[in-house]
Image: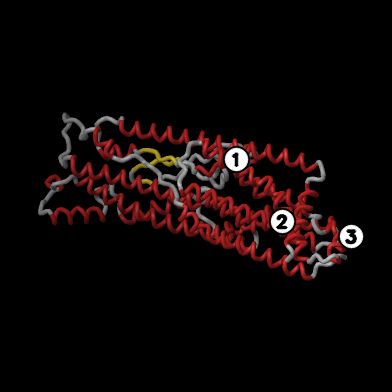
Amino acid sequence: MNRSIVVLLARQSWKNAFHSRAIYGVLVVLFLMIGYAAYSGWKMYTVQNEMREHYQRVARERWEDNPDKHPHRMAHFGTFAFRIKHPLSLFDFGLESFTGNAVYLEAHKQNTINFSEASMSTGLLRFGEISLAMLLQMVVPLIIVFLGFGAVAVDRENGTLKILLTQGARGREILTGRSLGLFAVAMVVVVPAFFCAALLLIASGVSVDLDLVGRLAGIALAYFLFNAIVCVITVAVSAGSQSSKAALMKLLGVWLLLAVLLPRTSQALGSYFFPAPSRVAFETVIEEDVLKQGDSHNPDDPHYKHLRDSVLRVHAVDSVEHLPFNYSGFVMREGERISARIYQQHLQALTRLYDKQNSLTTAAALVNPFTAIRNLSMALSGTDVESYKVFQSEAEAYRYTMAQEMNALQMELISNRKPGPQDKPLAISHDHWKELPDFKPQGIAIGASLRGAWFSAMALLLWSVGSCWWVGRLSKTLKAI
């Protein structure tokens, strides 16, 4: 391959793109959109995190400010867990607007995560949400289509292609040069978008560590590769079309199919083939299974009656009042263990069902690079479903620890003797509430994110290899007519 010819054609494509004054108007609009998306993403990240951290502190203060009381009452008093947004959510909102951000934690019950931004907004607000990732995934490829649909087709129409071929330029050199020139034009928009994201990360005051740098570098590499694929496909379609008009119609159809229709279709098919139960049905099944094991609040329940007899026999006493620990706390501990185990079993089954629903979308990455970049971008930005699962798991682990800590305090510090009519209610010092650690979400590590998005990364690499192969095959049959 003659590199000088490739460079010459790339420069010519660059000059042709900026030959028309219309491109400057388009770039101005795009830069304004990038600025708005970057600012709105940064504002949403900072405001939301400040709000969630504030209410997490309020929840902790209210927990610690409780007076002396029974530990079981404290377990039912509960607390809140708030999800902290990942710093790169300012680049790609992902599922952040649809998944909840707060959950109420209490004993014997696993509540759902509520207060998603979408549920608190109107449809118009949701429609008007623009992120940097959305611009790079949807708008920039469309601009590439309009700039590159005539990359080879126009040369064929005006006779330039015939001149290039007769003067010794080979098909591979022509297609490579046009693709590189179109890619350079695309980078005029892509590079500033990442520059804005990096500046806003610094302005946000986040801790810049290897995890964050690795994620940002991975996202940048993925988008550079994605735009290169779009440029190659655009030039290839232009080369395979007899006219620039036909090339434009084909490319618009491909963009509409890959960017809009296929993603929505795969999601709809996933929900159709693997229907998920409603929240009410899910909670009802769990409650029924817990009651089958036994009701810890019912002293005549067969399971817990057998448990009481066993405990009395082991400790060689004839009444729970003579046990060296509080028996009610022991029963509550056992009930919490059983209900948590049953909940985890049903949650894992539901998670597998959701994974099956998402499997169609994940598999679609093999035939749709737009799906591949979307999945990979959300994963590296910490805004995908896996990051939501991590928060859900952390919140449930904290809820279980809180409930069992209160049960342990009851077993240790509360007497088995019931207070008389004139006695004060059983209670322990409020100093014990501070012994429970505060909820501190750790978030998802980059390794876990990559494990969840390896298929999309592989699909994007396959698309790059396939695009190069397509150009190589098309270059052998490239004709001037």
Q: Secondary structure at mark 2?
A: helix
* Horizontal side, residue 201 vs residue 471: left or right: left
Residue type highlighted by circle 3: Gly
* Tags 2 and 3 touching, CB below 8 Å: no
**Could you tell me which residue is drawn at 80 percent across and 65 percent down?**
169
Q: Amino acid at mark 1?
A: Cys
Give left or right: position of 428 versus 479.
left
Using a 10 Å C-alpha cutoff, classify the residue at mark 1 as few (fewer than 14 neighbours), some (14 to 19) or many (20 or more). Answer: some
Q: Which residue is mark 2?
A: 180
Mark 2: give few (<14), some (14-19) or many (20+) Cα within 10 Å.
Answer: many
- Say whether disc 1 or disc 3 marks the residue closer to the N-terminus: 3
| Badge number at residue 159 | 3
Tell me, for residue 437, which label it has, or none. Answer: none
Camera-side residue: 417 or 55?
55
Q: Position of residue 117 (x, y in %)?
A: 54, 39
At x 76%, y 67%, the residue is 474
The residue positioned 60% from the left and 62% from the top of the image is 461
Q: Quote the CA–CA distance across marks 2 and 3.
A: 22 Å
Residue assigned mark 1: 196
